[in-house]
Image: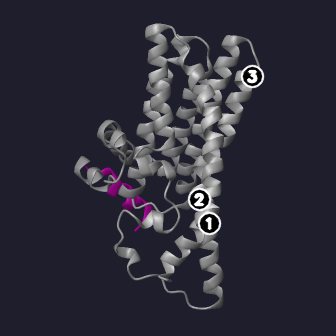
Amino acid sequence: MTEAHGGERARQVDLAAIEAVQPRESTGLTQRFCRPVSKHLTRFFLARGVPAAAVSAVNIAVGIAAAACLACPHLGVALLFIPLTYAAEVLDCSDGEVARASGTSDATFFFADVAAHYFITPLVVLALGVRAAVQLAATWPLVLGAVGAIFCTPTITLYRVRASIVLEELLARAAREPVRVHPLLPSREGRLAGDFGFERPTHRWRVPLGTGISVIVTIGLVVELATGLPALQAVSIATAVVFPLARAADYALTIRRGKPADELRRILGAP
């Protein structure tokens, strides 16, 4: 298929076709509040031939702008975080829809999509610390924000580390001998990511980490607007405590339960 033909095909995609490529296993919040809007944005991008990687790049830019607004001590500016982070969530849906609707299988897109989460979620956590530090004219809130941001990143990356280890082991075995994947694996729709170690821990609760933090911050901003209480300072302190403890527990349980070895055995159908 030529590039011109692919562009013409994209321009003919209607809303029904976009809805057909929207994943059904998305979280409830995403399905209810973002997908109904993202399909219109996706059609706009497809009609203009915008690649999925470019949509992901816009998502990163909007997310950075949202974090910058959140870091501002003035509540009026910080409240801009709410519409901006919603726009970022919609763009996060749209880039995948553009990729699926246009038949994109470009590794650059997948990198840009994942990088958006790696960049933005820790930035939001850090912004909470920056905002509290400016408000209190103290250094300790910034330190707590940095601790939360540092330990927030492994929440996103640890499951991918496990997956890369499993993939490397599969490739090493394939170099020595033929590797046969378990025949039941293709039938495990909705669980394939878990079989390969790519299941995100927060997805077990149907709420991605970035979405969950955005919701909590939004609630904190509304509380501050309504009551004047420093709700976001409490959120910043909570992230500095919860993320390190959760990461230590996840790391210990991964080793104790031998998760990478279990995932590899599941793929190969070994006992």
Point out which mark residue 160 bears: 2
Residue 5 percent location from the top left of the image: 37, 61
Residue 180: x and y in percent read 49, 86
Indicate yes or no whether the magenta region holds residue 13. yes
Q: Amino acid at mark 3?
A: Trp
Residue appearing at x 51%, y 68% in the figure: 196
Q: Which mark is residue 140?
A: 3
Disc ID at residue 164: 1
Q: Earlier in the sequence, mark 3 or mark 2?
A: 3
Of residues 232 and 19, the one nearer the viewer is: 232
Residue 172: which disc? none
Q: Are marks 2 and 1 in contact (CB under 8 Å)?
A: yes
Query: Percent position (x, y) of residue 97?
Result: 38, 51
Query: Is residue 123 among what the camera can see?
Result: no
User: Does residue 28 appear to the left or right of 220 in the view shown?
Assistant: left
The image quarter in which residue 134 lies: top right
The residue under label 2 is which amino acid type? Arg
For the residues bearing labels 3 and 2, Cβ distance under 8 angstroms: no
Q: Nearer the viewer, residue 124 or 116?
A: 124
Q: Nearer the viewer, residue 247 or 104?
A: 247
Mark nearer the viewer, 3 or 2: 3
Image: magenta residue range: 1-14
